[in-house]
Image (cartoon, rainbow, N blue to C red):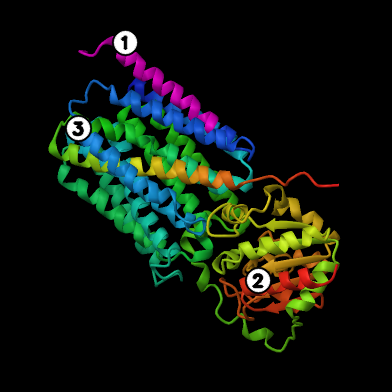
Amino acid sequence: MNQPFATQHLIEVAYLVATVLFILSLKWLSAPTTARRGVWAGELGMLLAIAGTLLHHGIVDYKWIAIALVLGSIIGVPLGMVHMTAVPQRTALSHAFGAFCVTLVGTAEFYLRTPDVPPFMMAVLAMEVILGSLTFTGSLMAAGKLQEVLPQRPITYMGQNIVNLSLLAIAVGIAVYLVLHPGARRLFPLVIGIPLVFGVMMIIPIGGADMPTVISLLNSYAGLSAAAMGFVLDSKLLIIAGALDGSSGFILSVIMSKAMNRSFTNVLFGAFGQVQTSATAAHEARTVRSATAEEAATILAAAASVVFVPGYGMAVAQAQHKVRELYDALTRRGVDVKFGIHPVAGRMPGHMNVLLAEADIPYDRLLDMDAINPDFPQTDVALIIGANDVTNPAARTDPSSPIYGMPILDVDKARTVMVIKRSMSPGFAGIDNRLYYLDKTLMLFGDARGFVGEIVKGVAGGGR
Amino acid sequence: MNSDLITSLYVFVLAGFIGFEVIRRVSPLLHTPLMSLTNALDAIAVVGAIVLAGEQKSKLATVLGTLAVIAATSNVVGGFLITDRMLKMFKASKPKKP
């Protein structure tokens, strides 16, 4: 103990204050009015913790630390400045970075400590490294799919789940062996390597529509691996931060899978895109009603209340700013305009809200599914922009539908339904949407951005 | 299992409960910023990496520690930056004109 007693205590106090600030940070995030304060609290906590750590008595050389801090900041700034549509892949990438950090530290600790590692410690260390490495490659894969560098369509093959689960089982088996024989250092690369492969295999069968759940799940894993690292380093601060992150990811995963009426296992082990291949053929004969932008503008302008239902298609078409113009034009005419947002709209939890907030739509106009559904029967027009499966009434009425039981936005209860859609092709899941064949439904065929722009012109020019 | 580990387990379980109760209250509006903020906070793993990079116990540990600091720092900087950028955009309606 050659460190002055006081410094040791100073570090501990800095960590304690940082812990409090982290919890406050998440607490303040609960409402948009206090949320930015939450970010500041988090930043202050982080600064204190890093400053405290730099006083650590074990540190003999600051050169590499300084270089790494500078390099990390240089990489971090562009990652913080990405476009809002790219936030899901950025988030996946940062899960990968977090997991990478944890895996590297775990690896270094393993080689520093073995062979004298007590069994419990080795078990935690193995968990840290397994979770860390599978989260690393899994998140990279997710980021690649979201960025569309990799094919978004699920890739499945016979016996996929068996292959994946055996991989994981082998990794865990080797980890157990290491717990019992910490001296068997040669086996350690397998405890990293196999989960790295598993991470890739785990994401291969997952399609774009499942990304919100998968990102949340990876978030949870990243948190848990950091908490495990906290056990290894005996750092309460790290355990707490990891537990907070882990529970956050877990809660979001639960919300996302409930919103899709699916279990975790179903998301991870049952590729969605494969469910139905012939669903479209049965409905060929049915007719739909379509309308022009002028007609749509007339109906919207005459309405008293309108609910917009945006989906990922709106983000793909970059239509959110045009949607905002339409919102403005209608609001000016005294129409009450709200947005109904399904929990899985977009490619990560809450993504749609961020895109609409970026387009300057006030957040009190953005309502989640449970808040907006009771309003639909009193709504004159529901305008669907780039959403599909989350509006399909078959989820309520048709037990044979693959999405039966999934909570949906009850747009079919509105007096008139308008759907902006490129063509009649089915949605991501390949399920035919019977909403489109209702008598009250008008199909507006075209590109979301262009079509909304036309409607705006119609509303603005449609007399005073 | 020594008492340190037991204490750590208590801390983990209690923090998990706090996280659950606090995060449950976060409005669905803010789920994306929530994820980027927890990501930044989770990068507190940087403290472990800093010690590893500075202790110079072995060449391997220094190299891995340095790489780990780079990864975690980019999460800290990028995570806080993007969270704040997102939250700045959330504005309430202006009060209605008569």
Q: Position of residue A189 (x, y in %)?
A: 21, 49
Report which residue position mark 3 lands on.
Answer: A113
Say what amino acid the circle numbered 2 marks. Answer: Ser
Distance in Å between CA atoms under marks 2 and 3: 55 Å
Whether marks 2 and 1 lie on the same chain: yes
On the picture, is B76 further left or further right than B67?
right
Prevailing secondary structure class for the magenta stretch in the rendered image: helix
Q: Nearer the viewer, mark 1 or mark 3?
A: 1
Whichever of callouts 2 and 3 sits on the residue coming sooner in the sequence is: 3
Q: Position of residue A185 (x, y in %)?
A: 16, 42
Nearest to the observer: residue A212 or residue A264:
A212
On the picture, is A308 further left or further right than A235?
right
Residue B96 lies, with reference to residue A279, above or below; the image says above
Q: Which mark is residue A401?
A: 2
Q: Which mark is residue A76?
A: none
- What SS does tag 1 mark? helix
Q: Which mark is residue A6?
A: 1
- What SS does tag 2 mark? loop
Distance in Å between CA atoms under marks 2 and 1: 67 Å
Nearest to the observer: residue A205 or residue B67:
B67
- Which chain letter goes with mark 2? A
